[in-house]
Image: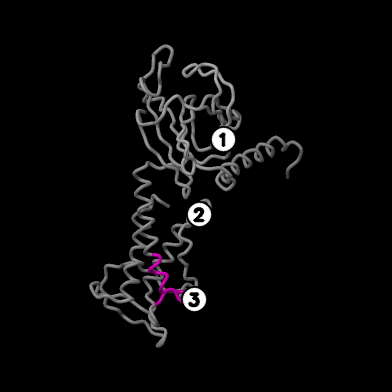
């Protein structure tokens, strides 16, 4: 039983739970927009061995950057003109400044760059000139990587001359960064699967709450859709992805003991006939165009999508 001697332990547990909840709901309470973030790759950059600096880090140096596309921000303050002393521009001047709060970049650095997506059309690039963070939260378990940064207009016109090392993009579905090529592949797959879902939805019976063609209920198609829905929901958080595909709960209730099968290679598939109440064998001639074959082809694609792309879920 807990008593006053347990207070230090309980407070530590509350604090740990609080840090975990901040990480859990960081993307659920995000009132600001996305940015493109250029993070200095310290390990791959060439710098002076003694003073660790160069004269011009954006054009003349060997400083390399990692690009983080679609970086979410918790807050972006309005860009205002303020007096500042910018030694690599005109010295003391009125400069465009702002502050920004981010939480997905593990280690931001002074002189990192930021650009904005549409509808911002100014084309200005901003650089980080000051960083603030909660050190005790950073060195906690779990740790928080929340940073408030001061921005000023960068002394470059575009990013074409920057030396780029790696390219990432933030996946809001998984709430993590992916290699740009992998993310592009994933989005292409999602576009394809969305088209297949539109096809499958044509054969959903609201009355029966399962997928059928007239009185014929293909077991393998309904099992595949159930597998698809279960697999994409296996995540620590509830992720709304492919919600327009309906899980056939009516099929689960009506055929609770039917063993699931996903063998689309067999030439003979089993159907249930609603009129007769009996199972029937169906010879699947793939070259024949029919509504039943269309449903089978689409549900096979759904099944293969998650089975052969496990890393995306």
Q: Are marks 3 and 1 in contact (CB under 8 Å)?
A: no
Q: Residue at point 30% right, 73% down?
A: 293
- Rendered view: 151 above or below 22: above
Q: Are marks 1 and 2 in contact (CB under 8 Å)?
A: no
> Residue 195, percent across and down?
37, 63
- Rendered view: 313 above or below 280: above
> Residue 57, percent across and down?
40, 21
User: Which residue does the numbered mark 2 point to in the structure image?
Assistant: 239
The number of discs equals: 3
> Residue 127, percent across and down?
48, 28
Q: Could you tell me which secondary element the residue under label 3 belongs to?
A: loop
Which quarter shows the N terminus?
Answer: top right
Q: Residue at point 48% right, 26% down?
A: 109
User: Which of the two marks, 1 or 2, is nearer to us in this view?
Assistant: 1
Instruction: Point out which mark residue 101 bears.
Output: 1
Neighbour tally class for label 3: few under 14, some 14-19, many 20 plus, Cα within 10 Å? few
């Amino acid at each position: 039983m807990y008593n006053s001697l347990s207070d230090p332990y309980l407070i530590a547990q509350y604090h740990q739970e609080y840090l975990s909840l901040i990480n859990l709901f960081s993307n659920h309470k995000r009132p600001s927009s996305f940015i493109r973030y250029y993070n200095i790759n310290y390990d791959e950059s060439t710098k002076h061995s003694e003073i660790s600096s160069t004269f011009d880090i954006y054009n003349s140096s060997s400083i390399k950057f990692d690009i983080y596309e679609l970086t979410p921000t918790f807050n972006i303050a309005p860009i205002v003109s303020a007096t500042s002393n910018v030694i690599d521009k005109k010295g003391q001047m009125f400069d465009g400044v702002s502050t920004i709060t981010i939480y997905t970049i593990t280690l931001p650095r002074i002189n990192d760059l930021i650009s904005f997506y549409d509808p911002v059309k100014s084309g200005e690039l901003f650089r980080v000139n000051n960083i603030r963070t909660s050190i005790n939260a950073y060195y906690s378990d779990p740790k928080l990587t929340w940073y408030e940064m001061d921005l000023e207009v960068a002394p470059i016109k575009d990013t074409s001359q920057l030396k780029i090392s790696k390219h990432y993009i933030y996946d809001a579905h998984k709430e993590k960064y992916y290699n740009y090529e992998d993310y592009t592949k994933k989005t292409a797959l999602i576009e394809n699967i969305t088209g297949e879902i539109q096809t499958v939805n044509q054969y959903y019976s609201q009355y029966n709450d399962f997928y059928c063609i007239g009185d014929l209920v293909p077991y393998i198609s309904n099992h595949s859709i159930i597998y698809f829905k279960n697999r994409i929901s296996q995540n620590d958080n509830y992720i709304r992805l492919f919600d327009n595909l309906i899980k056939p709960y009516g099929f689960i209730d009506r055929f609770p003991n039917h063993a699931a099968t996903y063998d689309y290679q067999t030439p003979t598939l089993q159907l249930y006939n609603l009129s007769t109440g009996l199972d029937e064998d169906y010879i699947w001639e793939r070259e024949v165009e029919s509504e039943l074959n269309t449903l089978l082809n689409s549900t096979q694609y759904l099944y293969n999508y998650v089975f052969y792309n496990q890393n995306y879920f």
